[in-house]
Amino acid sequence: MVRHTQRLSLRMPEDRDLAFVTSLFARPELVAHRPDPTPDSPEESARRLSRDRAHWRVHGFGRWTIEAEGRPIGFGGVTVSKEFEGLNLSYHLHPDCWGRGYATELVKEALAFSRDDLRAERVIGLVRPVNVASRRVLEKCGFDFEREVMLHGAPTHLLSCRMTRVSSNIVE
């Protein structure tokens, strides 16, 4: 199943995405906000792709491969949170694609999918305090700061978005 936005195609990750995942997570600027900002090894990238594909097999949804103009530019979407109430929204875009509005477009589609297809009541986003751009994207899309949590040994802002369902002209 492929979802489309105005400029993006969103599809289930496939084995053919491994080279892109490996090159993406090897970029220092992409991993700069992690507690350990060491770029991923090719083996860790393979494990990351395998985890994403396993989430799809178990739950029927997960993080998408994000494509623009027919080529992968990132990964993102919602997954089942093991630590917090609600679905967890996450995304990683290739740095060459930053600042073009792709993140906002992805987040809006992920929220629509969560609300309309998954009937989720709550979606969270976990953002390191120094990642101001990512927090701005979430807030623009309706997320509110909830609290600070420790994640992988580092302070992290937990933002949440409550889903509302529209039935006719009545918002539930």
Image (tube, rainbow, N blue to C red):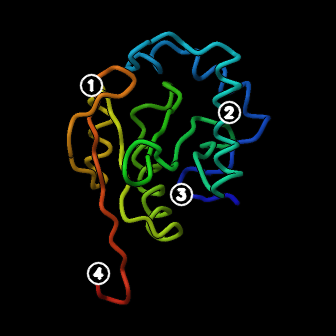
Separation (CA) of disc 4 from disc 2? 38 Å
Of labels 3 and 2, earlier in sequence is: 3
Residue 12: give its label. Answer: none
**For the residue labelled by badge 2, is the local secondary structure a helix, a strand or a loop?**
helix
- Residue 146 located left or right of residue 137: left
The residue sitting at 64% across, 40% down in the picture is 52
Q: Quadrant of the N terminus?
A: bottom right
Residue 166 picture location, percent across and down: 36, 80
Residue 49: give its label. Answer: 2
The one nearer the camera, 67 or 134, is 134
Of labels 4 and 1, earlier in sequence is: 1
Residue 17 is drawn in which quadrant?
A: top right
Question: Would you name the residue on which mark 4 appears?
Answer: 171
Question: Would you name the residue on which mark 1 appears?
Answer: 155
The residue sitting at 31% across, 45% down in the picture is 138
Residue 116 picture location, percent across and down: 48, 71
Residue 112 picture location, percent across and down: 45, 64
The amino acid on which the numbered mark 2 sits, given as a three-letter code, is: Leu
In the displayed structure, 98 sits above or below 107; it is above
Residue 5: give its label. Answer: 3
* Number of other residues with Cα within 10 Å of mark 3, as a class: few under 14, some 14 to 19, many 20 or more: few
In the displayed structure, 126 sits above or below 131; it is below
The amino acid on which the numbered mark 1 sits, given as a three-letter code, is: Pro
**For the residue labelled by badge 1, is the local secondary structure a helix, a strand or a loop?**
strand
